Amino acid sequence: MTGQNVRWGILATGGMAATFTADLVDLPGAEIVAVASRSPEPAKAFAERFGIPRAYGDWESLARDEEIDIVYVATPHSAHRAAAGLCLEAGRNVLCEKPFTLNVREAAELVGLARERGLFLMEAMWMYCHPMVRRLKALIDDGAIGGVLTVQADFGLAGDFPASHRLRDPALGGGALLDLGVYPVSFTQLLLGEPSDVVAKATLSEERVDLQTGALLSWESGAIASVHCSIVGGTSTSASVTGSAGRIDIPYGFFFPDRFVLHRDGKETEEFVADPADGARNSLKHEAAEAMRALRAGETESPLVPLDGTLAVMRTLDTIREHIGVRYPGETR
């Protein structure tokens, strides 16, 4: 596909799909050719809003459209396995929203299907593709703060969500952990890999989804991470990484930072600020650009968001849910 437009299909028409599509419209080399929903009306409205030529009232038609190079899946969490699997079965490459699936079993099924068929598959973990996060990781990998000893990260919303809201609906994979907690867990594992031990506590709703969860992750190296997520209280969404020779603080929005501060023993504090040329700090264009780069290069996985890393995060999320007693309808473990 070197040098040609990458043709996108959008599967779902909700807020996340709209946000992604708005960023995709302005990305050079991206061509949005179709959108699908479970019924014709929302698909047609979405197509008209973004100038998309084809609108399908079912997922199957989008999956079978051979003029689509890659499908972006933005359904509720509980439908990721079905939607992404349908597209992979039909021979479409897939960029699937986070959390990748409800559990590691479903994630492994999608990864196995993509690898069996030689198709590109990537979790839409935009944090991993964000220029400032990549810069932070490069500094840590180069030893800027020495060996990593501790990581702290949190993500909470001050929402008064009713029981009918998707964030409190077990059938949709509701709760703080999968929707928000996936970010601090993924950030931690980006730097330290999969933990060797996990302990967690949570406050559960009447529907038995987690309203807030705290987890302590540890590694055989001696490193420890504290992560927290909430749908009942707004947190600072900050992160701090402490090493044997210094510390990096992200004061706000650690998963899409516009700046971070490097403290090194015996040296002046350094502040790293985002390059305005990278665009809006909350743009999803970087994950789309990475998927397009990989497709043009003939790669079936992104080195920035490797599938084995996605599986490792899902294993950690599963373990946390075992500790806090959250299980979704239809799960058997």
Image: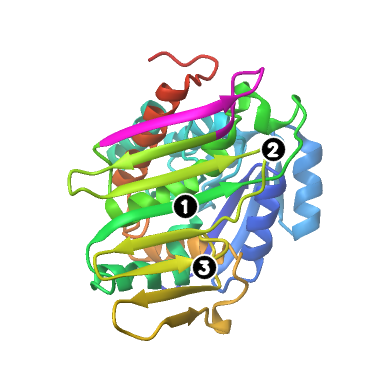
Between circles 3 and 1, the one closer to the viewer is 1
Most distant residue in the bottom direction: 268
Query: What kind of element bears circle 2?
Result: loop
Q: CA distance from mark 1 to mark 2?
A: 35 Å
Q: Which mark is residue 37?
A: 2
Q: Main secondary structure of the magenta part?
A: strand
N-terminal-most mark, 3 or 1: 3
Would residue 121 appear left or right of 204 to someone viewing this image? left
Query: What kind of element bears circle 3?
Result: loop
Residue range highlighted in magenta: 197-212
Q: CA distance from mark 3 to mark 1?
A: 38 Å
Q: Is residue 114 magenta?
A: no
Would residue 179 appear left or right of 160 to someone viewing this image? left
Between circles 2 and 3, the one closer to the viewer is 2
N-terminal-most mark, 2 or 3: 3
Instruction: Please state, as top left, top right, bottom left or bottom right, where the N terminus lies in the image.
Output: bottom left
Would residue 173 appear left or right of 69 to someone viewing this image? right
Give the residue displayed 60% in from the left and 76% down from the top: 279
Q: Residue beneath label 3, please?
A: 5
Residue 176 vertical placement versus 134 (above, below): above
Q: Residue beneath label 1, please?
A: 153
Q: Look at label 2 and name its amino acid.
A: Ser
Q: State the image quarter where residue 134 is shown.
A: bottom left
Give the residue displayed 41% in from the left and 45% down from the top: 226
Q: Look at label 3 and name its amino acid.
A: Asn
Most distant residue in the left direction: 221
Give the residue displayed 38% in from the left and 75% down from the top: 263
x, y percentage for residue 220? 18, 43
Asked if the residues shown at circle 1 and circle 2 are in contact, with their CB atoms under 8 angstroms apart, the answer is no
